[in-house]
Image: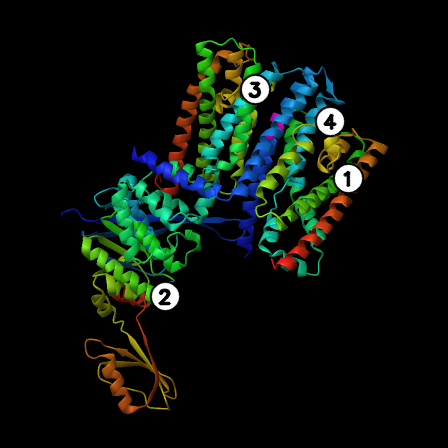
Amino acid sequence: MSMDAVAAEGLSRDFVVRHRAGRVRRVRHVARAVDALTFRIAPGESVGYIGANGAGKSTTIKMLTGILAPSSGSVLTLGLVPLRQRRDLARRIGVVFGQRSQLWWDLPLAESFRILSVIHRLAPPAAAQRVAELVERLELGSFLATPVRQLSLGQRMRGEVAAALIHRPALLVLDEPTVGLDVLSKERLRLFLREEMAQHGRTLLLTTHDVDDVQRLCERILVIDHGRLAYDGTLPGLVDRVGAQRVLVVDLAGPADALHGIPGTTLIDADPAGMRQRLALHPEQTSAAAVLAAISARATVRDLAIEEPDIEDVVRRLYAASRRR
Amino acid sequence: MFAAGFHRYSGYRAATAAGAFTNTVFGVLKASVYLGAISSAGGAIAGYDAQTSVTYAWLTQALIAPINVFARTELAQRVRTGDIAIDLARPADLQLSWLASDLGRAAYVILPRGLPPLLAGWLITGLSLPSQPLPYLLGSISVVLAVAVSAATQFLVSLTAFWLIEVRGLITLYTAFSGLLCGHLVPVAWFPDWLRLIAALTPFPSMLQVPIDVLLGRLQGPDALGALGVQMLWLGTMLVAGRLVLFRGTSRLVVQGG
Amino acid sequence: MPIWQAYRALIGSRARAQASYRTSFIFDVAGSTALGLVEFGEVYVIFHNVPVLGGLDLNAAVLVFALANLAFSIADIACGQLDEIPTHLRAGTLDAVLLRPLPALAQLAAGDVSMRRLGRGAFALVILVVALSRADIEWTPARSALLAVTPPAGAAIFAALFVAAGAAQFWLIDAQEVTSAFTYGSGYAGSFSAAVLPLPVRVLFTFVIPATFTAYLPTIALLGLPGPVALPAWLGWCAPVAAVLIWAAALLGWRAGLRRYTGAGG
């Protein structure tokens, strides 16, 4: 298929912000939430869309899905103009907003599925089969009859994902779907999404703060910072670019010298007594196990932890790096 | 914090202005209907002439917000959820503090909601209000009593939440009948005798009809004092009944565990 | 057509959910019946004192009241919650509506269908029947058609007012009561003889907000009575026209409101 799933060209969105300056005067200035985004997503790609809070992710998603108009530039989603062809687009995409529900709050989950099947004009036998399939794979059976407002966050998210997939959309847009979920639930959801995208060639656009989400699900990342596209590529590429690595934090049993020169690591800092030290790992040169062994040869490790590079950190570094250039 | 408070206040201000606007619109409509009725009747009905009727309409619209039928359903909600137990554990008397807070609410809204319709009435149809100070003095007392009677009665009705699962329907019934019997829709004096009797057996006329009649000067001197007396009687009755029901209700709560 | 099935599914779910709380549903219906009864009480009390109001006798006045209330109830059940759009705006639930392949307006109306207001409509229907049976009408096919058309046209007019009120919420947000003045005010204004209204008000509630088309004008047309100044009785046959015009205006307003929400339109 030659048509892109998403084609954004100079996409921008301004917001007028009014606030008080002094007691009476009101100052009005225009904030650019999204600034000339240009990118394409091909069908079948799984793209992660990351950025700090307020960077413009939700605004972009809203423009892609037709609930917000661009101030300038254009975007085509599945070849359609989202704002003008909202309903046609709604038939072909599935959207999940992590913070807001698409389901009917006081109705049982099964009822939401039924209504959506009717709304999407699915023939009853095919719809029932599809719902059953999703229920099974997302393990929704135990709470199908529960009103949505009584579901736990994890249950509701699974329900929302199922609801977004009932009509087999070509594009699935997920806005922070794993927020607030425990580790196990996150992993199960990611597994399901991987299978679903791979099996049916759907396109996935995922916004998230969780690096693991991106690692497990996306081959490509778009980083947005202060409304601008700061990076478009792979995750390892990004990590490399900004030099953000995983950090090993070791608590030693007794005072020790600073752990310089452990192969494949760079010492970031050590507390004055040397009891807690932080080392950045270079994964292409070594593994955590090897590093641990090397440390244990020099000191007794009482406890350890690994800090993942968090999105804000990566993005901040990225922005700092791009500004330095 | 100031900005947040101000913003909240301006939101409330907008809502109050909107409410006053609604009252004004209804004031025009009601005044028209009453005028039509008076002219059909040849000049007066039950002692209300054209100007008095029109003023009645405007006063109704001006006073309905402070006197208010059921803006506050929180009490019923708290009874239903059992949170009322927390309120009862507080040192302040529940009924009296409820009354006091409602009087405060009324004091807060009376000018912003009351003045615009009266002003509109004065401009559009003219108002027929007494020129001596006494009716205004007695009238003010009567309004305060009216608010109190209304609050006390709402308190009593809210307490039915101890026994009923869903109070909303009952509250609608209350709104409907109180609306008619307090004189909001038509002056009580215009009622057929049987309906006037029924109204007299309820506290509702004391909530609106009485203060308006005093302010209009229709009730003068001893009659006015008598009407105020009736208001106080109803206030007392509703307060006592409220305390009794509260006692029964909380006993039930304690026994049942909420 | 599948789209009607979608609405049926939406409305059906809501209705079932509401009716499941049986006792409170009954209380609600009783409450709304009481509201209708009490408003009728106003008419009754007035006519206890006078034989005629605004050129109408008791039965004619009851006819106007019943037709207006019936129309208003139907509109209220279908679209009455549209002025709660600010709640949706604050909760962000409007986006969910926009992400579905159905018109937003229809979803919002269907999603809030409120069966408990049936009581008022049922009461209005009952007294309509009674008033008709006692009315002195020379029935012709044309007049029968007028009677049949009036409640739906009236309901359409009030429904359009609710839609316009809903559209206004995109601008008003905190002052939603302003539209109540017009929706409920029109409901009231339509329920009695327009002859008692001062001329400017009469014109407002006829040619700007077509409240008098919902009951008063059709009634005087049916009864063969003359209309007051500026409102000739033949206007009573034009209620459907008024409905179409007010709907056109309301839909334009709705579209403008949605465009304001999505930020399209500068």
Q: Amino acid at mark 4?
A: Trp
Q: Residue at x 34, y 91 (%)?
A: A256
Q: Which residue is label 2 attached to?
A: A182
Question: Over which residues does the magenta segment extend?
Answer: B26-30
**Residue C14 quadrant:** top left
Nearer to me, B186 or C248: B186
Whether residue A315 is visible to the viewer of this picture, yes or no, is: no
Could you tell me which quadrant the N terminus of chain C lies in? top left
Q: Residue at x 51, y 31 (%)?
A: C183
Label 3 neighbour load within 10 Å: few <14, some 14-19, many 20+: some
**B233 left or right, relative to B24:** right
Task: Tell me how far mark 3 sits from mark 2, CA to CA.
Answer: 65 Å
Question: Can residue A39 be found in the magenta stretch?
Answer: no
User: Measured from the top left, where is residue B64 in percent x and y?
Assistant: 65, 37
Q: Which residue is label 4 attached to?
A: B194
The reply to whether callout 1 and callout 2 are in contact (CB within 8 Å) is no
Question: Which structural element holds mark 4?
Answer: helix
**Residue C4 quadrant:** top left
Please, which chain is the residue tagged with disc 2 on?
Answer: A
Q: Are marks 3 and 2 on the same chain?
A: no
Label 4 neighbour load within 10 Å: few <14, some 14-19, many 20+: few
Q: Residue at x 37, y 89 (%)?
A: A253
Q: Are marks 3 and 1 on the same chain?
A: no
Q: Amino acid at mark 3?
A: Val
Question: Which structural element holds mark 3?
Answer: helix
